[in-house]
Amino acid sequence: MIPENKKKDKPMSKTHFKFMLKHFKQRDKKCPPYNKIEKTKIKEGDIVLDYGCGPGSYSIAAAEVVGNTGKVYAADIHPLAIEEVGKRAREKGLKNIETILTDCNTKLENSVIDIVLLLDIYHDLSDPESILIELYRVLKNNGWLCVDDHHFKDEEIIDKITSIGLFKFIERKDEVFNFSKV
Ligand SMILES: C[S@@+](CC[C@H](N)C(=O)[O-])C[C@H]1O[C@@H](n2cnc3c(N)ncnc32)[C@H](O)[C@@H]1O
């Protein structure tokens, strides 16, 4: 259960979001999002939650991998992120992406997700523990949580994700750290 006294995050300003959008377009040219998705276990037919999806670079790449038998939920606190993901999905003709506007509660059923992506967002969270509790709830028992956050040292990421006792570290593939449920 998400604690009732959860600290609230606020969406960044529209100007900041638009700056991030430009920056990520350049990032994605240099490092195609599909390369990161390859470092996760995502495969055809999987149900994926991209938590803190931003403009959706990884949601789109994941949706192409999971195909029509799978699905990607793209969740973000920012309405512009939700708008941008919808736009990109329409442009690509992808019908297997659903957006969720949230600061924590995804409103998904328990244990329905194969892979959660938590990419470049942990450092932004004012109450990461509540988010981890929510991600634990929606993950299937054999599901994986995939984390990348270049704001932290490697050992810090492992420590932060495992410290509340819900996840254990499985493996690292370059910048992507994969965890399973305890
Ligand atoms: C640095 S961006 C990373 C976006 C994407 N994961 C990527 O790597 O391209 C972080 C995103 O997390 C979102 N975010 C921040 N706090 C959030 C929260 N509590 N719940 C959902 N999304 C949040 C921000 O709106 C932003 O779009």
Image: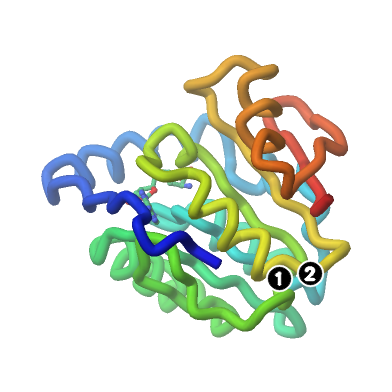
Q: Quadrant of residue 174?
A: top right
Q: Position of residue 114 (x, y in %)?
A: 77, 67
Question: The N terminus is located in which quarter?
Answer: bottom right
Labels 1 & 2 near each other (Cβ < 8 A): yes
19 sits to left or right of 15 = right
Q: Position of residue 113 (x, y in %)?
A: 71, 71
Q: Amino acid at mark 2?
A: Lys
Q: Quadrant of residue 48?
A: bottom right
- Residue at x-position 78% and y-position 58%: 42
- Residue at x-position 58% and y-position 41%: 32
The residue carrying mark 2 is: 140
Label 1 sits on a secondary structure element that is strand
Question: 96 and 73: which one is in front?
Answer: 73
Q: Position of residue 126 (x, y in %)?
A: 36, 41
38 sits to left or right of 93 = right
Q: Is residue 153 above or below residue 20?
A: above
- Residue at x-position 45% and y-position 53%: 52
- Find residue 113 and name its label: 1
- Residue at x-position 13% and y-position 51%: 14
Label 2 sits on a secondary structure element that is strand
Q: Amino acid at mark 1?
A: Ile
- Find residue 76 and name its label: none
